[in-house]
Image (cartoon, rainbow, N blue to C red):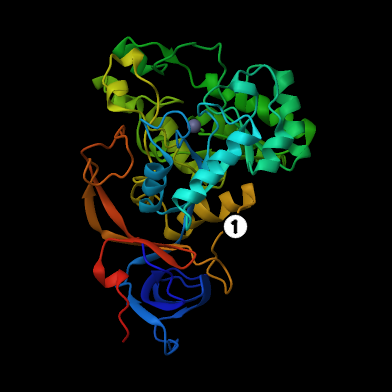
Amino acid sequence: MHEPDSKFMLRNCLRKHKNDSAENLYDLLVVEGKIAELAPAGALTPPREAAVYDAGGRQLFPSFIDAHVHLRDPGFEYKEDMQSGLCAAVHGGFGAVMAMANTNPVNDKGAVTGFIREKAARICPRGPRVYPVGALSVGLMGEELAPMGELAEAGAVAISNDGRPVQNNELFRRAVEYAASFGLKVIDHCEDADIAHNWQINEGGGSLHTGLKGQPSVGEAVQVARDILFAEYLNLPIHLAHISCRQSTDLIRWAKVRGVPVTAETCPHYLLLDDAKLHSYNTNFKVSPPLRTSADVAALVQAVQDGTIDILVTDHAPHAAYEKDTPFDESPRGFIGLETAVPLTSALFSAELLEELWCKKPAEIFKLPRNNFAPGDPADFFLFDLETPWVVNRDNIHSKSLNSPWLGQTMQGKIVAHWLGGTQIFSCEDSLCLPKPL
Ligand SMILES: [Zn+2]
């Protein structure tokens, strides 16, 4: 890690600027950890004492925000810990992550929220920042509301029972009201726990082919509908986690037309993979909610493009090799995703839309700081090299776990350097990390 250069300029960064139709090269000036100016290449004269780096035409992005991550710390450090999880985040382009509450102990107390924040700040003082998500119910058991005032005071930025759906509608309604009284949103894991209990795969062609127990997509959509009805009735916001199917997108689209205050997320894997992948019984394709059909994949891509789905998240869910290397029905659900998200989604969406989905909108929904490259914004940004391929394997992944559906495959595009608060956290190239006065 380098000490922050008090002033530096990054030349020749590729960006699509507000009203330009074409992508253009820009120069970025950073002063004391903040953005000073972003201007067309050649328009700025660097201050005399400023170091100058050449971005070589790489794409410049503000640091992304991942609003749905399982850091596994405290309690499951054999899967991931604060150090490895944040290392994976910053190499994946993320300057901030929201950490879900299903740790051990569960984050249902201010002391656990405080522990997570303190550990993150101690291990990675310059970032990535960690924003804890407090539990909705004590122990995530869905029976008694967690002390949300205490969680808010300790720094929780949202409330969620993620990993375990809330079946009790009365409790859920009270949770939304209680969270709102502290200015917090509920992030809901939408899944009816009674529909296809202990499911393994999407119900349909995949379950028929494999003989594994299927969960119909209506198992998700029925709770999406419930949440929409509550959000409208209470006129309080609810954020819908990891949407996976067409019925859910239809419901959310309908809700937004009516002005219901719901927002929604999906993950790169639901935009790229369908349940045919599970014909191999490869446990690295087992995730919650399950991969759906190719028609669901197409509906989700459309829903992201038309704004029905507001943001992208990874739902980074590390599991150890020995846990995944088991019979299919014993394997835990979930994928790692922090380091593959940007290359995967850059192949689907424009740079402008990526910035909305991974930075601008998550910051808006959860009221988090972000870099908009305006003077005074935090100098949090990374360079993405679309030309560089890399393979998803132990040598290239910083997460402790390797449970990726893309294991062994080639990603197109690599994050080559990342700065947070004007400090370079890592660089793959000497030319980008050694001050080179011109
Ligand atoms: Zn999750």
Q: Quadrant of the N terminus?
A: bottom left
Across the whole image, how many numbered discs are drawn on residues?
1
Observer able to see residue 112: yes
Relative to 376, residue 266 above or below: above
Q: Residue at x 26, y 23 (%)?
A: 282
Judge from the rendering whether residue 162 lies leftward or rightward of residue 326; answer left or right.
Answer: right
Q: As shown in the figure, which amino acid type bears the numbered disc 1?
A: Pro
Nearest to the observer: residue 122 or residue 399: 122
Q: In which quarter of the image is residue 210?
A: top left
Q: Quadrant of residue 275?
A: top left
Q: Where is residue 288 in the image (x, y as percent from the top left)?
A: 44, 25
Asked whether mark 1 lies closer than 8 Å to ligand 1, one says no
Relative to 11, residue 336 above or below: above
Q: Which residue is drawn at 50% across and 34% down?
A: 242
Q: Which residue is drawn at 49% across and 64% down?
A: 421
Nearest to the observer: residue 330 or residue 341: 330
Q: Residues within 10 Å of mark 1 (few under 14, many from 20)?
A: some
Q: Where is residue 151 in the image (x, y as percent from the top left)?
A: 67, 37
Secondary structure beneath disc 1? Answer: loop
Judge from the rendering whether residue 78 lies leftward or rightward of residue 125; answer left or right.
Answer: left
Residue placed under numbered mark 1 in the picture: 369
Relative to 383, residue 411 above or below: above
Observer able to see residue 96: no
Q: Where is residue 22 in the image (x, y as percent from the top left)?
A: 41, 71
Q: Where is residue 321 in the image (x, y as percent from the top left)?
A: 28, 27
Judge from the rendering whether residue 391 lies leftward or rightward of residue 42; answer left or right.
Answer: left
Q: Quadrant of residue 372?
A: bottom right
Q: In which quarter of the image is the C terminus?
A: bottom left
Judge from the rendering whether residue 354 lies leftward or rightward of residue 416; answer left or right.
Answer: right
